[in-house]
Amino acid sequence: MEVNNVIDNFQLSLSRVADSQRAIAMRAYMKNQFEFLGISAPERRKACAADIQELKTADPAQLLAIAQALWACKEREYHYVAIDILAKHWRSLRPDDSPLLLLLAQQKSWWDTVDGLTGVIGDLLRKNLTGGRQIQISMDAALEHPDFWVRRIALLHQLGWRELTDVDRLFHYALALADEKEFFIRKAIGWALRDYAWHEPAAIHGFLQANQSRFSGLTLREAAKNLKKLGE
């Protein structure tokens, strides 16, 4: 499978639905940090569906090489396609591929791509929980990474795990980063706690009551969205 040919196919598919006028608004929404082709998510997925499906036989090295090549493209839609590919074929990946996914997250970083890669990493680690909780050690290291986007991935990697959530890890991560001032960390702590509240609201309520002095108002508001107001 020739990576350059794959990229050419995606470029052709996306060029057919690009809208330069829409690109202006999309660029502004993302604070003019990235260039855009001007393609909505539904249009992008429809345009690239066949090309992505053809990658079902690709091995992990090929999938990651394609993702990296797409990440090197200027327009943001190519980065989204890379995530679409990884999200579609994550079962072909291995836990040892997580460091490469984290490297991608550190390039041209913003919440949109970081959170997309978080979902891929979370699926990959959850799939391999049968081998034991040591599979999450990589997230313990990520929690201490100098790049706050990597720390955000550590906080959010258990989203949707419900009864498989390592609750001690969740609470430890939340408290470990509670003093951070970064908006995207404070919001991520609240998001991670709120997500688990769907499964175990009493545990989250108790944790927030016991530790509310440790967290920012933003974190508490996010965490308690599915709960009664603290103190009631």
Image (cartoon, grey):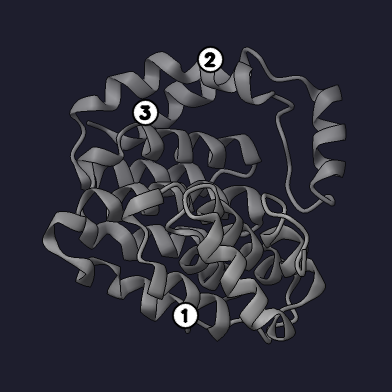
Secondary structure, mark 1, is helix
Residue furthest to the left:
131
In the image shown, does 22 or 202 lie closer to the viewer?
Answer: 202
CA gap, disc 2 to disc 1? 42 Å
Q: Position of residue 231 (x, y in %)?
A: 77, 69
Q: Closer to the N terminus: mark 1 or mark 3?
A: 3
Q: Closer to the N terminus: mark 2 or mark 1?
A: 2
Rate crowding at label 3 as few (under 14), some (14 to 19) or many (20 or more) other CA atoms within 10 Å: some
**Residue 175 picture quarter:** bottom right
| Nearer mark to the viewer, of 2 and 1 | 1
CA gap, disc 1 to disc 3? 42 Å
Rate crowding at label 1 as few (under 14), some (14 to 19) or many (20 or more) other CA atoms within 10 Å: some
Location of mark 1 (residue): 172
Secondary structure, mark 2, is helix
Location of mark 3 (residue): 6
Q: Position of residue 28 (x, y in %)?
A: 87, 43
Q: Position of residue 157 (x, y in %)?
A: 44, 59
